[in-house]
Image: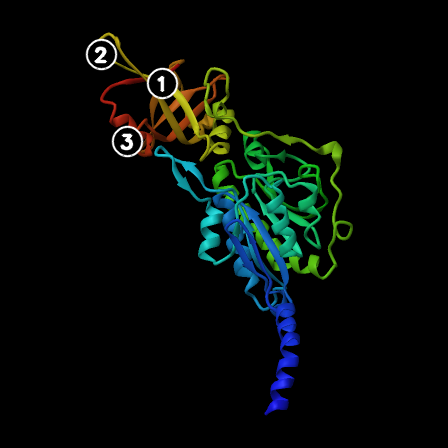
Amino acid sequence: MIITCLVMLFLSPLALSFTRSFAPRTVCVNTFKYTSSRLYSSKGRVIFLGTPSCASLSLQTLHNLSSLPSSSYEIIASVTQPPRPSGRKNKITKTPVHTLSEELSIPILTPESARESDFLSSIEELEPDLCITAAYGEYLPKRFLQAPKYGTLNIHPSLLPAYRGASPLQRSIQNGDEKIGVTVLFTVSKMDAGPIVEQIVEDSDPEVDAETYLDKYFVRGAELLGSGIINSVIDGSISMTQKVTTQDETMASKADKILKEEGELDFNSMTATECHNNVRAFAGWPGSTVRVNLVSGDNGNDVETVKLKVLKTRVVDKDDIDDDDLEKAHEREISPWKRGKKLSLVARCADGSMLEILDVQPPTKKPMDARSYFNGLRNCRIEWN
C-alpha cells in the first residue's frame, strides 16, 4: 500500500504534464473561444470568411460537402463583419454569415478590421490549413495570408482577369456582357490577381438580375471547392504554382464599388438596353429609381413628384410595338401599354428605343406590377423628369 502510494505520488507530476501536453488547446480572443480538434481529426482545417447572404450560401454548401465521406476538410471557424445598425430603426444586426455560423455551431470571429493584431494572432493560433473567402469585404494583409499552410482561396463572381474589385458581377451585367461566370483563385496581396484554379463560363441571360446570379455563382464556386479543389490543395496536387493559370495582366479590368446615385435612371441620356441592364445590375442595392411627376387636374395643374423604384423591366422588341404605340409614348411620358391581355408601362428612351416597365415600388408601398400601380393612380398622367 505504501509502495503504491509512493509510486502514484512520483507519477502524478508526470501524469499532470502528460495531460497538459495532450489536452485540446483552447484559443480565446475577446469573446471568441475555440477548442482545437487537431488531435482528434486528420481532416484539413478550413477557416471561412464572408459577409452577405450570397456568402452564407457558400458557407452552407461547403459545410454540407464537408460531411461527405470523401471530404478531407472541416470548417473550424468563420470570420465575418461585426454586427452593425441596420434598417430604419438602426437595429444592431448580425451578418447572414454570422447567423448561419451560429446555426451550424461554427465558432465566429468578427473583427472591425482584418489588420487587427488580436485577430491575426487568433488566426495563427488556430493553425488553419486553408482559408476560403467569399465576399468578405476586407483587405487581407500579408500576415493573414501567411497563416494558412496551403494558402487562401477566393470565390470571385466574374471571369477574371476581367472585373477585379468590389462589384464584379454587377459591372458585368451593367455592361451587357454576353459571357458571365465565377472564378476560384488563390489570393495574393494584389486584389483579385492570384493564379486561377478553375472557372465556370456561361452565356448571360438578359432577363436575370444580379441578386439571382450572385446566389447561383457563390453556390457554384463553393461546389467547385468542396467537391474537389480543397481535397487537391490539401493533398498537394494543386498549389500556387501547380495546375493553375496565371492571369493575363493586359486583360485586367476594374469593378469599382457601386455608388448609390448610379441607381438613378435617366431616360433622356440612356438607351432602353442601358436602363434594363442597370435595373438588373443594381437589383437589391442600390436599386433603380426614376423621378416622375404625377400630373392630374383638368389643366394638368396638380403635380406630385415622387421617386419610383423600378424593379423589373424588358427591352421592347421593335416588332412588338406599332406606330400608334409610339405616338402614345410621348417624349417624357411613361405610358400604359397593352400587350395581349397584359397591361404594363412603357417609356421612350434616348435613342428612341422603348423600355417596358413590369414591376415597380412606389414610396412607402410594397412592390407591385405596373398594372396595379397604374390603376391606382386614378387618371393621373406619369411623366419622368
Instruction: Say which label, 3 or 2, has the lower sequence index.
Output: 2
Q: Does residue 50 sit above or below 317 in this rendering?
A: below
Q: Residue at x 47, y 58 (%)?
A: 104
Q: CA distance from mark 3 to mark 1?
A: 17 Å
Amino acid under disc 3: Ser
Kindly state the secondary structure of the residue where label 3 is placed: helix
Residue 27 falls in image quadrant: bottom right
Q: Residue at x 48, y 37 (%)?
A: 209
Give left or right: position of 384 versus 190. Answer: left
Residue at the front extreme, as displayed:
2
Residue at the right extreme, as displayed:
241
Q: Does residue 45 sit above or below 306 in this rendering?
A: below
* Residue 201 in sight: no
Q: Depth check: 165 or 39 in front?
A: 39
* Residue at the spot of label 1: 292
Location of residue 304 in the rendering, given as x and y in whole percent from the top left corner: 29, 15
Locate the C terminus by quadrant. Answer: top left
* Residue at the spot of label 2: 297
Mark 3 and mark 2 in contact? Answer it, CB < 8 Å: no
Q: CA distance from mark 3 to mark 2?
A: 21 Å
* Residue at the spot of label 3: 372
Q: Residue at x 64, y 74 (%)?
A: 13
* Residue 89 in sight: yes
